[in-house]
Image (spheres, helix red, strand yellow):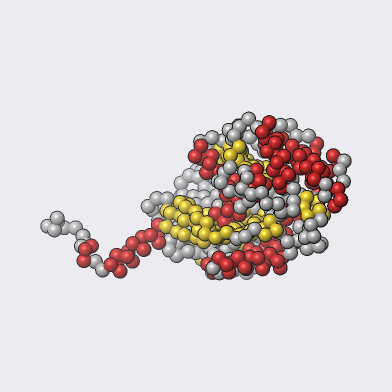
Amino acid sequence: MHDEDFFHTHEDGQDEAVQAAVVKAILDQETLELLTVGIDIGSSTSHLLFARVFFQREGHRSADRFVVIDRTIVWRSPIMFTPFLPDGTIDAHALSHFVRDCYERAGFSRDDVDSGAVILTGEAIKRTNARAIDEIFAAESGKFVCATAGHRLESTLAAHGSGATALSRRRGQPGLHVDIGGGTTKMALVVDGEITDVAAFAVGGRLIARDGQGVWTRVDDSARMVAEELGLAVDPGGLADPETRDRLASRLAEVLVDEIVDDPLDALGSSLELTDHLRRAAEPQYVTISGGVAEYVFGHTHEEFGDIAPELARAVIKQLSTRLSIPCIDPGEGIRATVIGASQFTVQVSGTTLHISGGAALPVQNVPVVRLPALSPETPPDPIELAKAIRAGAEQRDADLGAPVCLAVRWTGSATYERLAALAHAIADVAEEAVDPATLLAVVIDADIAQLLGRVLREDLGVTRGLVVIDGIELNELDFVDIGELIEPPGVVPVVIKSLLFA
């Protein structure tokens, strides 16, 4: 072999430190580890956890995407009752103290956190200071934390965080996931590990609850509707009667199981729906249940917390025993399903062929997405007409093109210079609307052409605005994005795609 004319090395004589440095350099380019945080502020309870999410490059090219290969929970907070002030708003001071205490007890600082999510769910969304609370925690909880809320997103996160999507993938069967929380119940139809539709309705275990003095004073609107139908009094004296609470819980359970087994809804059931009715593209072969009420359904706890969750769980069990013909399965996580989903399933990672220029400042949060119309895979678009379409799309969703904005492009076909240049001319046209040249313009494209498009915009067309062009990610109408700081190596940015939904 030594007579051959090719390059070779003798590793036995190589310094161990050099070998270790080479191995580390390779791993840094091929793997990525992020510390994430999930904060769930719900109708009944609030809690937090930290997790590590591990990514690996999908192939061996520098442009290949990073995919999640493992997730590990590293710390779980105690569960606290969500604090509300006498005027019905959320007690921001108490929540801030709780979160700071969790960080300290877990041994992490804000600078340690790479990604995560703050989720306001259920009845908490309806509070008048919900948006302010969400944005406070987005700013205070880490350098890149997603602030988001909404029934559909919570349904999705609960299905992932509970283990229901993984269970569907293992079983190879469609399943119906049901997360029964304090103020709402969320459902997700999962087929081969993919969520095909979600829905939510106002049934939960803390619609009726005691105050700090042990008096039954909390009665949410949906519980009042049930009481009115049944002709029951919901004053503290009436609710102190266990039979009254049992009747209310039984009626709520009936509505809940109507949704599970897809029976026709009566007037009460229809009035409690918070989203469109669940579309069943496939018939579920089993049901999984998570949420606080699931802790009672599967017997994980018998402790009472001053609400009707135990009564609701007993009523649900009774209804399911006679009306459900498919198995009911514990997916593995109960009350913490949503927060696990928030910490582990919100973050994606861009491709490495991205472009950043013009002093673009990262991280950024809550950037509205304007989706471009479909582009022909063969002929270049008309730059003038495409720029008009971008402005019309921005106007339709109240997005200011002169403020931080994200343009979403779906690309099919070859990346010829003519097609790229036409797209770039349209983008450059709308980019001029920013008064401050440092104002961010993000372009997210689903094809592997971010660097090419960025160079055309910057070098050929002279766009001076703060510019970030990212590939490998798909966006839809009404999305918002958070884009994190550049992680070197391997030269990627974390991206959270979300919808901000507030009552």
Q: Name the residue rendered at 54%, 39% in the picture.
A: 168
Q: Name the image quarter holding residue 9.
A: bottom left
Q: Residue at x 12, y 57 (%)?
A: 3
Q: Percent position (x, y) of residue 227?
A: 84, 43
33 vs 79, left or right, is left
Spot the residue most to the left. Answer: 3
Question: Is 457 placed above or below 181 here?
Answer: below
- Comparing 146 with 283, the one in front is 283
**Residue found at x 66% / y 33%:** 321
Front one among 198 and 295: 295
Q: Nearer the viewer, residue 116 or 48?
A: 48
Q: How many marks?
A: 0
Asked if residue 153 lies left or right of residue 71, the reply is: right
| Image quarter (top left, top right, bottom left or bottom right) of the N terminus | bottom left
Q: Which residue is drawn at the image coordinates 70% and 52% (left, top)? A: 304
Out of 188 and 84, give the one closest to the viewer. 84
Q: Is residue 183 visible?
A: no
Residue 276 figure quarter: top right
Please state if 217 lies on the left or on the right of 114 as rendered: right
Q: Position of residue 74 (x, y in %)?
A: 52, 59
Residue 258 shows in the view? yes
Q: Quadrant of residue 96?
A: bottom right
* x and y percentages locating residue 211 in the rendered image: 78, 58
Q: Position of residue 339 (x, y in %)?
A: 61, 54
